[in-house]
Image (tube, rainbow, N blue to C red):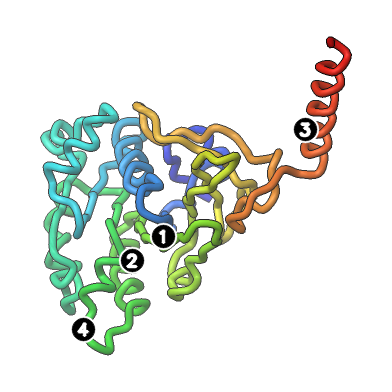
Amino acid sequence: MTRQKTGIVELDAMLRGGFLERDAVMVAGSAGTGKTTLSLQHLVNGITKFGEPGIYLTFEQLPDQIYRDAENFGWDLKKLEEQDKFRLVCTSPDLLLEPDGAGQLLDSTIKEIQPRRMVIDSLNHLEMYLPRGGDMRKEAYRVLNYIKTKGISPLAIWETQQSAGQAFSVTDVGMSFLVDCILLLKFVEIDSAMRMALVIMKMRGSDHDKELKEYAITSQGFKIQGGFSDYEGVMSGIPHKVASERFVDMFQKASEKHKGATSH
């Protein structure tokens, strides 16, 4: 099986070497979880580390905003465009929803740079522009399939809703069966602090890491830090320490209390 590395070492290890080539990937999560950062980093690393040109297709953000945000992480998208290794396509979802919209919008760009990776930001905006009675799953399948038939691996962003203390699912909207791999990003509250967690929900045709991992957005981009082995219930939205950790905490508190009492 040919793998397509993200260039994020810890994530590639979780994926057992990277995404399967030409698989449709979904990065899902609520606002602010770093979906765009992860997706851009996957695209930039593909170009700079693995020689795979890429397209960033966005319906939401203006080009200047994307260039600026990327520059904050040291990614010079304009330079990559000048080298014909990258294209930023900013358009309206209704153009993509036309019968041959994907072809009209992307064919010439694909011929220009021969991309191997493409990010779609985001599928939610396709849903917003669907005509009355339109089938979101059918339209998303059509777009993703078009990209795959061009020899390109699509990565689609999907924004989910997350309420405090509540788990959420990407299967609620019936999108999960359309993609081969799902990365879920979410906020978790632990010890009165907000932290961020990633889990691979699905990876068709491949083994993968099932453990929930903590991550952070650093000046270099997306950084996976480690697991939540000391806690249970993180995915449910109500995390608590495992029994062994609770025992250690109780023992330490008792020891400190005893030490304080004997010192007087």
* Circle 1 residue: 24
Compare marks 2 and 1 and give the one earlier in the sequence: 1
Compare marks 1 and 4 and give the one earlier in the sequence: 1
Q: Residue at x 40, y 47 (%)?
A: 33
Q: Amino acid at mark 2?
A: Leu
**Label 2, label 1: how far apart the Cα atoms are:** 7 Å
Is mark 2 in CB contact (under 8 Å) with mark 1? yes
203 up-or-down from 242: above or below? below
Q: Residue at x 18, y 68 (%)?
A: 93
For the residues carrying marks 1 and 3, which lies nearer the camera in this image?
A: 3
**Residue found farthest to the top:** 263
Compare marks 4 and 2 and give the one earlier in the sequence: 4
Q: Which mark is residue 41?
A: none
Q: Residue at x 34, y 27 (%)?
A: 219
Q: Secondary structure at mark 1?
A: loop
Q: Secondary structure at mark 2?
A: helix
Q: Residue at x 34, y 68 (%)?
A: 145
* Circle 3 residue: 249
Q: Amino acid at mark 3?
A: Asp
* Circle 4 residue: 131
Q: Is residue 157 left or right of residue 189?
A: left
